[in-house]
Image (spheres, grey):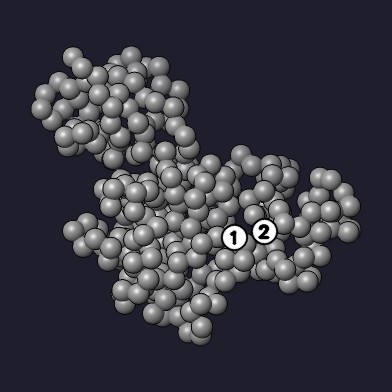
Amino acid sequence: MVAERGRILKVYNNVLHVAAEDGVLFCKLRGRVKKGRSDMGLVPGDIVTFERISAGEGVIERIEARTNLLQRPRVANLTQIVITVAAASPDPHPLVVSRFLVLAELSGVKKIVLCVNKMDLCTGDPASYLAEYEAAGYSVLRVSAAGGTGLDDLRAHLAGEISVLAGPSGAGKSSLLNALDPTLALATGVVSEKIGRGRHTTRRAELLPFMGGYVVDTPGFTQQEITDTAPEELSDCFPEFSHHTGCRFAPCSHSHEPDCAVKAAVAAEEISRERYEAYLALLNELRMKRK
């Protein structure tokens, strides 16, 4: 048999849907691969070597090393993360947005984009909406799945990439993908008026072919814990901090120390106070976990 390479698109009931050159195969793990596996299992995005046992079935012989891994949702070998939030219904909370951006920074994926959906519900100047994240160095896309605005810009960012749309429930990730490609026909939900957030319409992560690459529709999460990160490493996940050096103490936590360049930048409005307060909240969270 000839060994071939493919990418896992979906894992369902222990069956691995693998994209090959001529279509999608349904694969299972070879016994010795299953026995020797030391990670938490195969995930969408993993590259594998397989052998065919019939026209539409195969057996996975080897799993290739990952270039990166997003923990929740678990997706591997991404080239881009698109943090997707809503402009309203539900309103974006600065701590939630920064939490997702920190998780993206920790994943090892180089390209991180912030996509703000439901701009048709936004009041005020759209260009200035969430501008503090642009000042932090992120590309911010302001779009509306319902109104169709900004979709060409989002489409251009997704073309040729392996992108995951991740963010809180109710942000409209599935609605955005349907607006970009109606043939996807993904299930969508509505935001609960009682709890102010959306229902989890996506049940599992899956890679969907899109414009020479893939997009990943993922289950939404209302909160995500930042784990396995030391408090002193958190500042590296706030790229705007790197432009302000010269703290009196090294290392500096940028929280209580005097003569801190980051605190001075916040006071001078060179760093967003909302972003800084989100940093302090996450820093305290990590410190509490150490106790």
- x and y, in percent, of residue 281 in the image: 68, 59
**Residue at the limit of the structure toward the left, as seen here:** 55
Q: Quadrant of residue 75?
A: top left
Near mark 1 (Cα within 10 A), the count class, few <14, some 14-19 or many ≥20, is few
Count how many numbered circles sit on residues in the image: 2
As drawn, the label of residue 220 is: none
Percent from the top left, x then y, of residue 202?
Answer: 32, 54
Q: What residue does disc 1 label?
A: 137
Residue 168 seen: no
Disc 1 on helix, strand or loop? loop
Most distant residue in the bottom direction: 124
Quadrant of res 121: bottom left
Residue type at mark 1 is Gly
Q: CA distance from mark 2 to mark 1?
A: 7 Å
Quadrant (top left/top right/bottom left/bottom right) for the N terminus: top left
Q: Which residue is mark 2?
A: 240
